[in-house]
Image (cartoon, grey):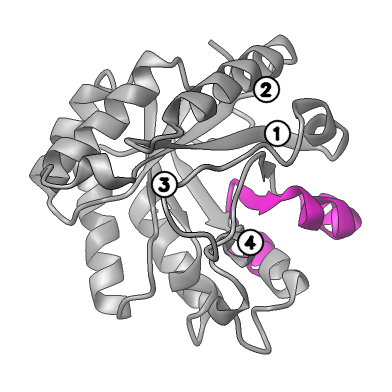
Amino acid sequence: MVNLSGIMKEGKAFYLAYDQGLEHGPEEFNDRNVDPLFIIKIAKEGRYNGLIVQKGIADKYHREIKASKVPLIIKLNGKTALVKGEPISPLLCTVDEAVKLGARAVGYTIYIGSAHESLMMKDFEKVLREAHSKGLPVIAWVYPRGKSIKGKSERELMAYAARVGLEIDADMIKIKYDGNPKDLKWAIKAAGSGRVKLVIAGGSKVNEELFIKNIRDIIKAGAAGVAVGRNVWKSDNPIKLSKKIRKIIFKK
């Protein structure tokens, strides 16, 4: 197993995600947060231990990201929100490219339940082998999607996503939280009770009170941390909110 110390502090994960421009489109942005420099500033001043971006931002803003000293996590695959139907997220960046851009870890999305699941699984195996040969951790975004998941409970799907991450040998798993701490505890057990670190996606923008409550519940349940995005950089005061989150995760 590769060393996660480059993207974790005290065994905890506190990541700022900014890959939504590709995944959701410019509708997520305003005049302030559309600028990657604004996000890099938040990552630095909020003392995040990971900044998640696609390779284009990692390349075009390489100097500023490096100067921030925030560990870079490059998302290797992605898709737009424009194409409907069974989801598939193709490779857009190689492990070699990520290494050249200074990545300390790479991320890869698998939509379990999609008709194209097997293709993403195959690419993940290749990514994992190449990344591990270079000592680079791999974070698996595991999201249940597609027609075949209809009728399945959120508890079942969250635990299944976590278990898939364990079974495919991910170093860390990023999943979506269903809002129930008991369900999350079960998902953590499904991921090997800490053998694989579980990180929770920040999700769509909600009011700050609920957002903070969810983070408290997530950390109390035993997750390693969070990868927050829209709830932070859409906030009126992202740095202040970042400090609140950091205090919950690191308890200081």
Q: Are marks 1 and 2 in contact (CB under 8 Å)?
A: yes
In magenta, the rendered stretch is 42-69
Q: Amino acid at mark 4?
A: Leu
* Whether residue 232 is situated above or below residue 1 in the rendered picture: below
Q: CA distance from mark 3 to mark 4?
A: 18 Å
Frontmost of labels 4 and 2 is 4
Pick whichever of labels 1 and 2 is earlier in the sequence: 1
Q: CA distance from mark 1 to mark 3?
A: 31 Å
Frontmost of labels 3 and 2 is 3
Q: Please tell me whether mark 1 sits on a helix, a strand or a loop.
A: strand
Residue of label 1 = 104
Q: Quadrant of residue 101?
A: top right
Q: CA distance from mark 4 to mark 1?
A: 21 Å
Q: Amino acid at mark 3?
A: Glu
Pick whichever of labels 3 and 4 is earlier in the sequence: 4
Q: Quadrant of residue 60?
A: bottom right
Residue of label 4 = 22
Q: Position of residue 117 (x, y in %)?
A: 43, 30
- Res 163 visible: yes
Instruction: Look at the magenta stretch and give its main secondary structure.
Output: helix
Q: Amino acid at mark 2?
A: Leu
* Whether residue 183 is situated above or below residue 186 in the rendered picture: below
Residue of label 3 = 86
User: Is residue 94 covered in magenta?
Assistant: no
- Res 7 visible: no
Q: CA distance from mark 1 to mark 2?
A: 6 Å
Q: Amino acid at mark 1?
A: Arg
Q: Please tell me whether mark 3 sits on a helix, a strand or a loop.
A: loop
Q: Please tell me whether mark 2 sits on a helix, a strand or a loop.
A: loop
Out of 88 and 57, give the one closest to the viewer.
Answer: 88
